[in-house]
Amino acid sequence: MRKKQILFAFGMAALLLYACVRDELFTDRQQELSNELAVGKNRELTVAAAKEWYVDNGAPVTRMGVTQSNVSGILVTPSWNHAKEWKKGRYEVVEASLRSNMNVILYDQDTKKQKKKMSKKEKRRVMNVARSVILKDITTGEIITFNMIFIGSLNYLMKYDDLSDNNYLHRVPHFDGMVLYFCPSGEFVNGWKYKNGKIIKRLSPVLDEAALSDTLSSATTRAIQCYTNYYTESYYYCPPITRSAFMDDWASFYGTGEFGGGIDDGNGGNSGNSGGSGGDPTLEGGELEGPTITAPACYWTYREVPYTECYDDGSSDGGGGGYIGTPTDPSVPVKSHVKKIIKNTDKLTPQQLEKLERVIKEMEEKICYAKQIINYLESEGFAFNYVYMDPNLGGGRANAGNSILSNGTVDLVFRGEDDITYGSFAHELVHLFQIHLGVYSGTISRGMMEYERALIDDIMYYSKIKGSKKFSDAWYEKVERSSFVYGNRPGEDKIKAVEWDKKQAKYLNWLSKLTKKGTPISIPNDDFKEWISLFSENSRTYSPDNGYNYNIDYTPKPLAKVLELASSCY
């Protein structure tokens, strides 16, 4: 009997042990697939992996707050000593506190107004949380980095002590204030304003009046209002000093300052600063190697930083809270402009990827039909496979191109980072669109594809200006981006030059009549054919002498499809 009891107890212990192990495994698997926030459970993007990736791919020092009036911004670098891991669904995040080359704190207009009335104790409660974010999509393997700062409202900061509990994937339920996102080069990208944990406004870089008008007119079905607001950037500035042991950007990091340790008290020190120099002129190098140095005379100063603030009456979807764009879930990043149209970007440096993101966004804002092409291709599941740099592209003469592989995929190629422009991307985007619609039949079709691309851009430009013949800045911008079909005027042969003048005038009159009421419904096939010789004979780049063929049967399906897609543009 005693033996049976021992066996029973042993069996129960084994069962319980199995149950605990099984439950633990189940919990991990459930966490991996769920949207529950997990702390310190990253499987791929650990702190060590994030730091290694950052060192290999990012600049050791980045910037925040770069604007036209402040081109240097604030130098910042991540402090890895207390970096933390976060995981939610398909995303793993590592956040590292930012150290600055100066004591700095950001606060809103309400805090600025109340600053003089605040006691020293209250000033100590005004703080920020500023972090470098390394984000990995574990389903695609893509990693991006950016800088993030939380600015609490005065009421929130006086009432709560949990500002640091906010992170990229999570906001405390009662958070009031702003979260701002900056690309590594320092420019403000986007942000969100919260009230009781809910998004009430979306923030973006300052728009000029014309751009703001366009924003409002494009949202006439939604009661959206936009205006310019400001936050204050207050910092304890010390003139630059030199440390030969460090590169230029590192040279300014003589302190151990972090963002936000209380508002300045106006007496040359930082009230309650928990991470900076205060008024002490002797500073250690912190995590950076180097000698103890004596700082020059320092002082508090500030500047007002403008941003555009938009809110609605509740009839919109309210936006989201991620970096770049408007995701439906505030805790999940939006699909970037790049990811809509390019599947793999791991052959680009972070700086190249960042520029490409800005370029595509600029293209969508300036060329409506190109934006419609992207939306169409995304709905069709067709995109560039890879994007990369090739300094020998076209013998070193081409700015951009595409590579069509035997398996039917298409790669996007730029000669170099300087060649990543919205015009060159729009050019290759149209070719991707043409390939998808089946007009590519080998190199023999390149000439007609280039002609159709140029004709599409001409027609859509004239549709935008409703057939106007007036020259403007927009006309010069269009020419810089994409030459007109009529190409270059012959300079040496006077007879050919006179003939070219006549054909150019005839072509522009045709465009003007065609687009007088906006985007045409269709183009007669004879009209499409009429201007082929004008293009082939006067295009220096795409001439028959350079191997471009125009004597083939070609059905302009892409042109017809663009007119359909862009019917709502102009």
Image (spheres, rainbow, N blue to C red):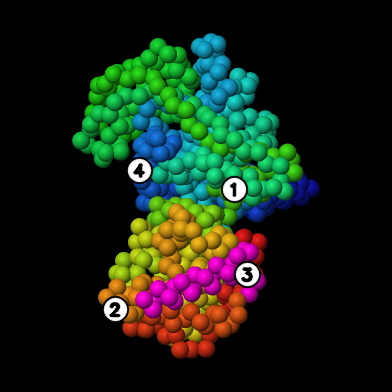
Quick one: label 3 or label 1, which is nearer the N terminus? 1
Whether tag 3 and tag 1 are in contact, CB under 8 A, the answer is: no
Q: CA distance from mark 2 to mark 4?
A: 58 Å
Q: CA distance from mark 3 to mark 1?
A: 23 Å
Residue that mark 2 sits on = 493
Circle 1 residue: 214
Closer to us: 420 or 212: 212
Read off the magenta span. Answer: 498-522
Binning the other alpha carbons within 10 Å of mark 4 as few (below 14), some (14 to 19) or many (20 upward) gives some
Q: Reading the chain from its start, which is encountered first: label 1 or label 2?
A: 1
Q: Residue at x 42, y 38 (%)?
A: 67
Mark 4 or mark 3: which comes first in sequence? 4
Q: Amino acid at mark 4?
A: Pro
Q: CA distance from mark 4 to mark 1?
A: 38 Å
Please tell me whether mark 4 or mark 3 is closer to you in this view: 3
Q: Nearer the viewer, residue 226 or 393?
A: 226
Amino acid, disc 2: Asp
Q: CA distance from mark 4 to mark 3?
A: 52 Å
How far apart in space, not on screen, are marks 2 and 3 (Cα)?
A: 36 Å
- Residue 520 has which mark? 3
Q: Nearer the viewer, residue 411 or 230?
A: 230
